[in-house]
Amino acid sequence: MKDYLILIDKINQQFEQFKLLVLKETKEVEELGNFHLTPQQEIIMCYIIRNEPVIANDIANHFEISKSAVSQVISKLEEMKMIYRQENSINRRKTFIYLGDRGKEFHQLLKKIDDILVEKYYSKASLAELENVLETLNKIVGTKKQDKLR
Protein backbone atom coordinates (compact mmCIF):
# COMPACT_ATOMS: atom_id res chain seq x y z
CA MET A 1 0.00 0.00 0.00
CA LYS A 2 2.81 2.42 0.90
CA ASP A 3 4.47 1.85 -2.50
CA TYR A 4 1.19 2.76 -4.22
CA LEU A 5 0.89 5.97 -2.20
CA ILE A 6 4.45 7.03 -3.04
CA LEU A 7 3.95 6.33 -6.74
CA ILE A 8 0.53 8.04 -6.79
CA ASP A 9 2.10 11.15 -5.26
CA LYS A 10 4.67 11.21 -8.09
CA ILE A 11 1.93 10.69 -10.69
CA ASN A 12 -0.09 13.53 -9.17
CA GLN A 13 2.96 15.80 -9.31
CA GLN A 14 3.42 15.02 -13.02
CA PHE A 15 -0.28 15.66 -13.68
CA GLU A 16 0.11 19.06 -11.99
CA GLN A 17 3.13 19.84 -14.18
CA PHE A 18 1.21 18.73 -17.25
CA LYS A 19 -1.73 20.98 -16.31
CA LEU A 20 0.68 23.91 -16.02
CA LEU A 21 2.09 23.17 -19.48
CA VAL A 22 -1.39 22.96 -20.96
CA LEU A 23 -2.44 26.21 -19.29
CA LYS A 24 0.68 27.98 -20.53
CA GLU A 25 0.30 26.74 -24.09
CA THR A 26 -3.42 27.30 -24.38
CA LYS A 27 -3.96 30.55 -22.48
CA GLU A 28 -3.52 32.78 -25.54
CA VAL A 29 -5.59 30.47 -27.74
CA GLU A 30 -8.43 30.26 -25.21
CA GLU A 31 -8.51 34.05 -24.77
CA LEU A 32 -9.29 34.36 -28.49
CA GLY A 33 -12.50 32.39 -27.99
CA ASN A 34 -13.52 34.14 -24.77
CA PHE A 35 -15.93 31.30 -23.84
CA HIS A 36 -15.94 31.59 -20.02
CA LEU A 37 -17.28 28.07 -19.44
CA THR A 38 -17.42 26.51 -15.99
CA PRO A 39 -15.61 23.16 -15.65
CA GLN A 40 -18.99 21.36 -15.66
CA GLN A 41 -20.11 23.21 -18.80
CA GLU A 42 -16.80 22.45 -20.51
CA ILE A 43 -17.02 18.72 -19.73
CA ILE A 44 -20.61 18.56 -20.96
CA MET A 45 -19.65 20.45 -24.13
CA CYS A 46 -16.89 17.90 -24.78
CA TYR A 47 -19.43 15.10 -24.36
CA ILE A 48 -21.82 16.78 -26.81
CA ILE A 49 -18.98 17.33 -29.31
CA ARG A 50 -18.05 13.63 -29.19
CA ASN A 51 -21.62 12.29 -29.31
CA GLU A 52 -23.75 14.84 -31.18
CA PRO A 53 -26.71 14.69 -31.37
CA VAL A 54 -27.52 13.80 -27.78
CA ILE A 55 -30.52 14.00 -25.50
CA ALA A 56 -30.47 15.29 -21.92
CA ASN A 57 -30.95 11.76 -20.54
CA ASP A 58 -27.73 10.66 -22.29
CA ILE A 59 -25.82 13.39 -20.46
CA ALA A 60 -27.46 12.65 -17.10
CA ASN A 61 -26.71 8.93 -17.41
CA HIS A 62 -23.14 9.40 -18.62
CA PHE A 63 -22.17 11.79 -15.82
CA GLU A 64 -24.47 10.26 -13.21
CA ILE A 65 -26.09 13.59 -12.42
CA SER A 66 -29.74 14.55 -12.10
CA LYS A 67 -31.84 15.53 -15.08
CA SER A 68 -32.51 18.80 -13.27
CA ALA A 69 -28.79 19.60 -13.10
CA VAL A 70 -28.41 18.75 -16.78
CA SER A 71 -31.37 20.94 -17.65
CA GLN A 72 -29.80 23.92 -15.87
CA VAL A 73 -26.49 23.49 -17.68
CA ILE A 74 -28.19 22.94 -21.05
CA SER A 75 -30.30 26.08 -20.60
CA LYS A 76 -27.21 28.14 -19.84
CA LEU A 77 -25.29 26.67 -22.80
CA GLU A 78 -28.25 27.45 -25.05
CA GLU A 79 -28.29 31.08 -23.83
CA MET A 80 -24.59 31.27 -24.70
CA LYS A 81 -25.32 29.93 -28.23
CA MET A 82 -23.04 26.97 -27.49
CA ILE A 83 -25.84 24.52 -28.31
CA TYR A 84 -29.33 24.48 -29.68
CA ARG A 85 -32.19 22.09 -29.14
CA GLN A 86 -34.37 20.54 -31.80
CA GLU A 87 -37.52 18.56 -31.12
CA ASN A 88 -37.51 14.97 -32.38
CA SER A 89 -40.26 14.79 -34.99
CA ILE A 90 -40.81 11.08 -34.28
CA ASN A 91 -40.89 11.28 -30.47
CA ARG A 92 -41.80 14.78 -29.27
CA ARG A 93 -40.79 13.94 -25.70
CA LYS A 94 -37.15 13.74 -26.82
CA THR A 95 -35.25 16.84 -27.79
CA PHE A 96 -31.95 16.54 -29.64
CA ILE A 97 -29.03 18.73 -28.59
CA TYR A 98 -26.66 20.00 -31.29
CA LEU A 99 -23.67 22.32 -31.34
CA GLY A 100 -24.62 25.95 -31.89
CA ASP A 101 -22.42 28.49 -33.65
CA ARG A 102 -20.36 29.23 -30.52
CA GLY A 103 -20.20 25.49 -29.78
CA LYS A 104 -18.68 24.92 -33.22
CA GLU A 105 -16.14 27.67 -32.50
CA PHE A 106 -15.35 25.97 -29.19
CA HIS A 107 -14.88 22.66 -31.01
CA GLN A 108 -12.42 24.32 -33.42
CA LEU A 109 -10.56 25.81 -30.45
CA LEU A 110 -10.22 22.35 -28.86
CA LYS A 111 -8.83 21.00 -32.14
CA LYS A 112 -6.29 23.83 -32.24
CA ILE A 113 -5.25 23.10 -28.65
CA ASP A 114 -4.88 19.38 -29.46
CA ASP A 115 -2.66 20.27 -32.44
CA ILE A 116 -0.41 22.40 -30.20
CA LEU A 117 -0.18 19.67 -27.54
CA VAL A 118 0.59 16.95 -30.08
CA GLU A 119 3.25 19.06 -31.77
CA LYS A 120 5.01 20.22 -28.59
CA TYR A 121 4.44 17.43 -26.06
CA TYR A 122 2.62 14.23 -27.05
CA SER A 123 4.93 13.72 -30.03
CA LYS A 124 7.82 13.27 -27.56
CA ALA A 125 6.33 9.88 -26.71
CA SER A 126 5.80 7.03 -29.14
CA LEU A 127 2.31 5.93 -30.11
CA ALA A 128 2.92 2.68 -28.21
CA GLU A 129 3.78 4.64 -25.05
CA LEU A 130 0.67 6.77 -25.40
CA GLU A 131 -1.43 3.63 -25.95
CA ASN A 132 0.00 2.25 -22.68
CA VAL A 133 -1.05 5.44 -20.87
CA LEU A 134 -4.54 5.09 -22.32
CA GLU A 135 -4.72 1.42 -21.37
CA THR A 136 -3.68 2.23 -17.80
CA LEU A 137 -6.23 5.04 -17.50
CA ASN A 138 -8.91 2.72 -18.91
CA LYS A 139 -8.09 0.17 -16.20
CA ILE A 140 -8.31 2.79 -13.46
CA VAL A 141 -11.56 4.33 -14.75
CA GLY A 142 -12.98 0.91 -15.64
CA THR A 143 -12.54 -0.26 -12.05
CA LYS A 144 -14.69 2.66 -10.87
CA LYS A 145 -17.45 1.79 -13.34
CA GLN A 146 -17.36 -1.93 -12.44
CA ASP A 147 -17.64 -1.12 -8.72
CA LYS A 148 -20.88 0.78 -9.40
CA LEU A 149 -22.34 -2.19 -11.24
CA ARG A 150 -21.95 -4.46 -8.20
Image (cartoon, helix red, strand yellow):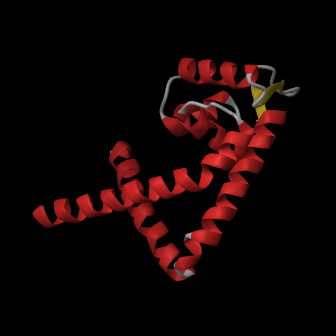
Residue 79 left/right relative to 140:
right
What residue is drawn where x is 88% and y is 26%?
89
Asked which quadrant contains residue 82, the reply is: top right
For residue 22, say whether it is visible: yes
Looking at the image, is 100 positioned above or below residue 140? above
Image position, residue 74 (x, y; %): 66, 24
In the image, 122 versus 64, the foreground residue is 122
In the image, 95 versus 32, the foreground residue is 32
For residue 100, say whether it is visible: no
Residue 104 left/right relative to 6:
right
In the image, 11 versus 128, the foreground residue is 11
Total labels: the figure holds: 0
Asked which quadrant contains residue 44, the reply is: top right
Image position, residue 109 (x, y; %): 73, 48
Q: Quadrant of the C terminus?
A: top left
Image position, residue 103 (x, y; %): 76, 37
Q: Quadrant of the N terminus?
A: bottom left
What residue is drawn where x is 62% and y is 20%?
71
Which residue lies most toward the left here? 2
Image position, residue 87 (x, y; %): 83, 23
Which residue lies most toward the right here? 89
What residue is drawn where x is 77% and y is 49%?
108
What residue is drawn where x is 79% and y is 42%?
105
